[in-house]
Amino acid sequence: MSPSAGVTYADVQDAAQRIAGVVHRTPVVTSRRLDARAGARLFLKCENLQRAGAFKIRGAYNALAQLSPQQQRAGVVAFSSGNHAQAVALAASLLGIRATIVMPHDSPASKLAATKEYGAEVVGYDRFTQDRAAIADALAQERGSVLIPPFDHPSVIAGQGTAVKELLEDAGGLDAVFVPLGGGGLLSGSALSVRALAPEAKIYGVEPEAGDDGRQSLQAGEIVTIPTPETIADGAQTTALGRHTFPLIRDLADGVLTASDTELADAMRLLAVNAKLVVEPTGVLGLAAALRLAEGRVGVVLSGGNVDLDRYARLLSD
Ligand SMILES: *Cc1c(COP(=O)(O)O)cnc(C)c1O
């Protein structure tokens, strides 16, 4: 294990204790028809049924719960147009912390509404002319608030690792685990859990074909940055792995795979028909690759279910 990365399985265990009773222990679902399709026995970890609709609450709550009383009083800031925003907003409201979320003016109305419903203050910005990180930094400076990043933070990584910890405990004896990959918080946390609980099992991250910076980074041996990829997997449109996530993935994961947008839509359709599960495009990245490659007993994280219904219907019917 890379000491430079600074996060260990003990941190995942601590996170599990911190989030217990607050974050759902989501079900692990199986489907004989999906198994027949994959030629493997699949165990689906349903983070689409998680609070706020995705695994992100695990890392957000774990990070916020560890702030000092003084930091909690000063509030937190995050920038995100997606699931991290809602996760930080919900975690903050559960802990009685003030949250400010920097989101583009043109975010989907449902996401803006959900973030505000959890009690967060939303600060808008123009995606084309303004730098959201700079805005968030300035806000944090001005208010003395802590900035909570979406993936590149030790407490966030440790929190995300709890999903696969639960999956391994509940499904047992897995040969491989497939998880979606964006900035790598989920994959690095998952890799910590696999190496500790099922050292012989393989752990793969799956990113969009159009945004394979993770695969490129592993090949190059350093973090490769790409332009924002065009893909229906809006939760994995990241441009680079992080300073904390890259070394963990390099040292602990067995590889990075990709899935095309067509495969993602197919996997969403299969889940709806066979398992009656609504999963967002990013959430089926792991399943899409598992359908192609899985053998034996295989764990798959369905990472989230936040997708507008009209968009969902369009993706399924195309
Ligand atoms: C954020 C997110 C991901 C990617 O997670 P990383 O930790 O950035 O790799 C995957 N799926 C969903 C649903 C997400 O919200």
Image: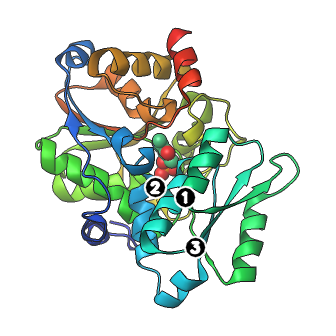
Amino acid at the residue labelled 1: Pro
Q: Which residue is depicted at the point 56% across and 54% down?
A: 117
Quadrant of the image for the N terminus?
A: bottom left
- Residue 248 lies, in percent from the top left, at 41, 59
Q: Residue furthest bottom?
A: 70
Q: Which residue is mark 2?
A: 185
190 relative to 102 in the view: left or right: left
305, above or below 118, in the image: above
Residue occupied by mark 1 = 150
**Which of 19 and 182 lies nearest the eye of the viewer?**
19
The span from disc 2 to disc 1 (Cα, nearest Å) is 8 Å
Taking the spot 26% from the left edge, 13% from the top edge, the residue there is 37
Image height of 62 relative to 31, above or below: below
Q: Kindly identify the residue that appears in the image at 47 percent across and 87 percent down.
A: 68
Q: Position of residue 146 (x, y in %)?
A: 60, 77
* Quadrant in the picture for residue 158: bottom left
Which sits earlier in the primary sequence, circle 1 or circle 3? 3
Query: Would the CB of label 2 be found within 8 Å of ligand 1?
Result: yes
Dot 3: within a 10 Å radius of its alpha carbon, few (fewer than 14), some, or many (20 or more) residues?
A: some
